[in-house]
Image: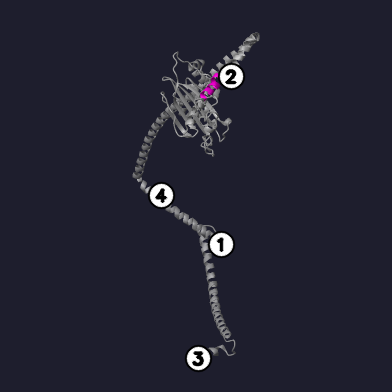
Amino acid sequence: MSAVTENTQQDLFAEPAERRSYIIEQLEVYNWGPFQGLHRAEFDGRGSAIIGQTGSGKTTLVDAMMTLIAPRPLYNLASTGGHESDRDLVSYVRGRTGEGNRDDETHIARPGATVTGIGLRFGDGTRTVTLTALFWLDGSSSATADLKKLWIFARNTDQTLADWLRLHREGGARAVKQLARELPETEVRDSKKAYLALAIRFFEVGENAFQLLNRAAGLKQLNSIDELFRELVLEDKSAFEQAAEVIQGFDVLQEIHVELQTARDQQRSLLPIEQEEKVRRAKEAQREALEALKQILPLWFADRGLGLWQARRAELDHEMRQAEAALEQLRLELERREQAVEDAHRFYVEQGGGSIEQLERQIAQQERILRECERNARDYQTIIRALGFDEALTPSALTANQGQGRRIQAETAERQQAVEEQRFRQGGELQELENRQAELADALKKAKAHSHSNIDARFLQFKTDLAE
């Protein structure tokens, strides 16, 4: 329900003493029947006509108007002769074609989740009244119970159907209702009955007026107007029933008095509820204030955060300037120390630092020689240990080891010479044995080659050589 005040609601329907007539100025449809996307039709106040071939959508546009003003619109009456309807609201939302036409096959233009909108604007030359309806299905269902609806009654607003559709696409029904609470002279209803009550009250017409207009839009013969006028205007059974009830009321005035007294008692007993209603309204106002505060809080926090970050940035800028000053001092100190090092090196060279460097190179060379000697000493001790000599690294031990080594070397040379002579003799014997073995192998080979003869192979060879 809209949150406008009672004064605003009264102003919504206030009219000047000299009342002017409202006429249709514009019709907008979005995803309505065969009309895909947004379409807009402007009407001339002096008169307009909707013309086109059969099936071009003339009745579809009329049905869009009837959807906004008729309590229970009968669709496609112009095609059925004004007696019955062969379409429903869901079929227009889905964009179903084929039903009521010659085609037997039904085609659905919008089978999934879809949104449909209708907008009808009236004007009297200076002011406007806009009737808008939004319909949507969240899934693939085509059941009437799954169709969601919003009805919007607004005066003197710049909101178009495209604006309401965009708002609904971004925030759903909640966003539409929220904007309606903020706009003056704008009401949003979930119930079509409550919405039509606003329209009937504003236009000051009877409850059957819009239904009569719906039936009249489907008439094709003028002689049907009398029957329709008699049915919906002259023979309004509800008025007869009300009159009968009033007549019966005169017979039971005492009972009415008692009922009035009872009503007074009930009214007095409901006074506490009135107080509770005032408390509820105060709480509601408090809640709205809290809601407004809730919307403002992010901006407040953002402003506070901006201030804190700006203060932090100022601190960091100050620290950075201090760091840059310290860095400059350190750079100057570094240059001063580098100059001191350069002066000290020049003084070092002037005082003979080059000779010291040469001595350092000689020391490094002597250290390499020392490491070589230590490695040779370790090898010497390894050999001495294997020979069983004295391992002491002293001149006397070295002399003793050298004498003992020469004696062992002499003895080893004598034994080596005897071994060499024995090896030479054995080598000659081995050569003779190898030659003998070769001769025997050759004889054996030749014997095998002449195994059929008992003559000595040498004679056979002589025979061969003689023949050649």
Say few, some or many: other residues with alpha carbon within 10 Å of mark 3 (under 14 / 14 to 19 / 20 or more). few
Say few, some or many: other residues with alpha carbon within 10 Å of mark 4 (under 14 / 14 to 19 / 20 or more). few
Q: Earlier in the sequence, mark 4 or mark 3?
A: 4
Residue 458 position in % (x across, y down): 55, 88
Asked which secondary structure carries label 2, the reply is: helix
Q: Earlier in the sequence, mark 1 or mark 4?
A: 4
Give how far apart the Cα atoms at labels 1 and 4 are: 39 Å
Q: Residue furthest front?
A: 223
Q: Earlier in the sequence, mark 3 or mark 2?
A: 2
Residue 322 included in the magenta stretch of the image: no
Left or right of residue 322: residue 222 = right
Which numbered marker is on residue 141? none
Contact (Cβ within 8 Å) of mark 3 with mark 2: no
Residue type highlighted by circle 2: Lys
Q: In front of the other: label 2 or label 4?
A: 2
Q: Which residue is mark 3?
A: 467
Picture layout, residue 464 above or below residue 4:
below
Residue type highlighted by circle 3: Ala
Magenta-highlighted residues:
224-235
Left or right of residue 360: residue 227 = right
Picture layout, residue 367 above or below residue 335:
below
Q: Earlier in the sequence, mark 3 or mark 1?
A: 1
Which numbered marker is on residue 360? 4
Asked which secondary structure carries label 4, the reply is: helix
Q: Which residue is mark 1?
A: 386
Q: Earlier in the sequence, mark 2 or mark 4?
A: 2
Q: In front of the other: label 3 or label 2?
A: 2
